[in-house]
Image (cartoon, coloured by chain):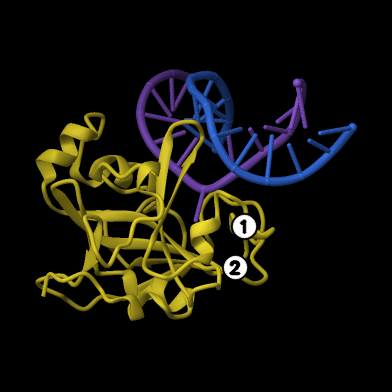
Chain colours: A yellow, B purple, C blue
Amino acid sequence: MNRPLPRRFFARPTTLVARELLGKVLAFGGASGIIVETEAYLDKDDGAAHFARGMTPRTEVIYGPPGHAYVYFIYGMYDCVNVVTEADGVAGAVLIRALEPLAGIEAMRRRRPTARRDEDLANGPGKLTRALGIKVAHNGVDLTKGPIAIHQPQHAGPFEIAVTPRIGIRKSADLPLRFFIKGNRFVSRVKMKV
DNA sequence: AGTTCGATCGCCT
DNA sequence: GGCGATCGAACTG
């Protein structure tokens, strides 16, 4: 029940994995949260992907086997975590953008003292990595083996999925590749028009 | 070797 | 709604 999702879950089309990651649990650092928002970054016709111009030292793990973490550092301050998708040798990644805190909320508060409300703990890609303690040092780790893991929730309820363009990108800005749980208040930019 | 700018956040108005 | 912080990756020359 608490076993990490198997590699075959990740070895599928990126947009499908992005949708199906919603409602799953991301756990690390004595804390966990329900994934409520994701974005897909595609191998083809996606100018916004870090790997849009091919493999570089930074994007190497995205071309490797699925089910691994791609963690990058941005704006001189923030770490963001992606899940590598598609078959080994094919690029594809899903950015985890927001979590609904589930367990270890005290640990999250200690790591994010500026968050006033529980809604602010992990409602953004830089915030959730800070809340869980995920850093670029974890780039390339195998998510099917832990300690960073994604698993099924204990109690799964039904939900609707909303689809919008991705946040904060210039290229391929029109593609509908952002997915979130409709009505969930832990999603980033809740008031953005869908 | 130098420059540009980004898959962000938090504080300011 | 706007902007400064802060720095590495990748592109230019």
Q: Answer above or below: position of A181 versus A8.
A: above
Q: Nearer the viewer, mark 2 or mark 1?
A: 1
Q: Amino acid at mark 2?
A: Leu
- Quickly name the residue at label 2: A175
Q: Amino acid at mark 1?
A: Ala
On the image, the x and y values in percent for residue A12 come to 44, 80
Q: Answer above or below: position of A91 versus A167.
A: below
Q: The disc numbered 2 marks a residue on which chain?
A: A
Q: Are marks 2 and 1 on the same chain?
A: yes
Which structural element holds mark 1?
loop
Comparing A178 with A145, the one in front is A145
Q: Answer above or below: position of A12 versus A29.
A: below
Which of the 4 image quarters holds residue A55?
Answer: bottom right
On the image, the x and y values in percent for residue A61 come to 49, 59
Q: Answer above or below: position of A148 versus A117.
A: below
Which of the 4 image quarters holds residue A25?
Answer: bottom left
Residue at image coords 19%, 44%: A118
Q: Residues within 10 Å of mark 2 (few under 14, many from 20)?
A: some
- Quickly name the residue at label 1: A48
Q: Are marks 2 and 1 in contact (CB under 8 Å)?
A: yes
Q: How far is mark 2 from mark 1, CA to CA? A: 10 Å
Comparing A125 with A116, the one in front is A125
Counting residues from the N terminus, which is met first, the one under dot 2 or under dot 1? 1
Question: In the picture provided, is A55 more to the left or to the right than C7?
Answer: right
Comparing A139 with A164, the one in front is A139
Q: Residues within 10 Å of mark 1 (few under 14, many from 20)?
A: some
Residue at image coords 48%, 64%: A93
On the image, the x and y values in percent for residue A168 come to 54, 49
Q: Of the numbered discs in the image, which one, if any, rests on residue A108?
A: none
Q: Quadrant of the N terminus of chain A?
A: bottom left
Q: The disc numbered 1 marks a residue on which chain?
A: A
